[in-house]
Image (cartoon, rainbow, N blue to C red):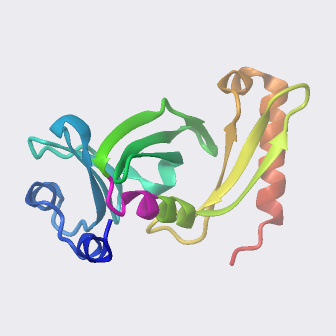
C-alpha cells in the first residue's frame, strides 16, 4: 500500500450505509468491509457492531464486554477477527461466550482501533490458580459512564463455576484483589 493510499484510508469517511445505520450521536471510529458483501464490522465510540449490507445494524458489543479480539491478517488488507464476548452470569462473574468470527476483505484501521479500545477498558488483570485444577482471570475494567472500575472474575473452565470449592476460592480471590485495589 502506498503512502498516499494509507493517508486516504486514514482520513476517509465511513460508507453511507454505515453512517445511516448508526444512531444519532454514535461515532464510527473505524470499519472494515465483510467478505461476500455481507456489510461492515464497525468500531464505534460505544462498541463493536456489525452492519449488514441491507443497512441494518446489530446491537453494539460494548468494549468492556469483549474478552478477546484476535486479528489474523490474510493478504494485504483482509483477514479474520475472532471476537469473544463476555456475559455477566451473576454479580461479579463473567463467562466467555462463543467466539464470533468476522471475515474481512478490507480491514482498514479496524484491528488497531479494536485493540486500543479493548485495552483501554482493562485497568488490571491477573490470572490465579484454583485448588485442584483450572484457574480464574481477575479483571478490573473501566465501564463507560460509571465512576471507578469494576472487578470481575472469569473462570478458565465454565464447569468450575458449579464446583463449590472453586467458587469459594474465586470469590475469596476476588474479595482480596478488590480490598487491595487502590484506584488511579
The answer to whether residue 28 is visible is yes
Is 128 drawn above or below residue 140 in the view shown?
A: above
Between 180 and 1, the residue placed more toward the observer is: 1
Residue sitting at the far front: 2
The answer to whether residue 60 is visible is no
In which quarter of the view is residue 129 placed?
A: top right
Q: Residue at x 82, y 34 (%)?
A: 168
Counting from the top left corner in percent of width and height, residue 125 is at 72, 56
Is 18 drawn above or below residue 96 in the view shown?
A: below
127 to the left or right of 36:
right
Between 43 and 87, the residue placed more toward the observer is: 43
Q: Which residues are magenta?
A: 107-114
29 to the left or right of 38:
right
Dominant secondary structure (helix, strand or loop) of the stretch shown in magenta: helix
Q: Residue at x 10, y 54 (%)?
A: 17
Is 39 drawn above or below residue 177 in the view shown?
A: above
The quarter of the rendered structure image containing the C terminus is bottom right
Q: Residue at x 54, y 72 (%)?
A: 147
In which quarter of the view is residue 58 placed?
A: top left
What is the count of numbered marks? 0
62 to the left or right of 106:
right
Q: Is residue 132 magenta?
A: no
174 to the left or right of 154:
right
Q: Residue at x 61, y 65 (%)?
A: 149
Counting from the top left corner in percent of width and height, residue 23 is at 17, 60
Counting from the top left corner in percent of width and height, residue 144 is at 45, 66
Amino acid at each position: 500500500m502506498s503512502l498516499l493510499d494509507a493517508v486516504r484510508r486514514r482520513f476517509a469517511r465511513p460508507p453511507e450505509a454505515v453512517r445511516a445505520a448508526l444512531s444519532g450521536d454514535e461515532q464510527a471510529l473505524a470499519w472494515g468491509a465483510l467478505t461476500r458483501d455481507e456489510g461492515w464490522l464497525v468500531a464505534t465510540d460505544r462498541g463493536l457492531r456489525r452492519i449488514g449490507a441491507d443497512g441494518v445494524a446489530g446491537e453494539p458489543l460494548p468494549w468492556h464486554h469483549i474478552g478477546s479480539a484476535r486479528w489474523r491478517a490474510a493478504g494485504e488488507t483482509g483477514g479474520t477477527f475472532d471476537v469473544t464476548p463476555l456475559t455477566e452470569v451473576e454479580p461479579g462473574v463473567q463467562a466467555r461466550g462463543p467466539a464470533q468470527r468476522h471475515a474481512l476483505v478490507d480491514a482498514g484501521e479496524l484491528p488497531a482501533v479494536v485493540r486500543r479500545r479493548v485495552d483501554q477498558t482493562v485497568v488490571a488483570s491477573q490470572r490465579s490458580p484454583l485448588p485442584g485444577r483450572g484457574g480464574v482471570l481477575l479483571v478490573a475494567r473501566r465501564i463507560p459512564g460509571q465512576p471507578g472500575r469494576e472487578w470481575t472474575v472469569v473462570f478458565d473452565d465454565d464447569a468450575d463455576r458449579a464446583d463449590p470449592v472453586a467458587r469459594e476460592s474465586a470469590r475469596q480471590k476476588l474479595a482480596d484483589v478488590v480490598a487491595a485495589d487502590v484506584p488511579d
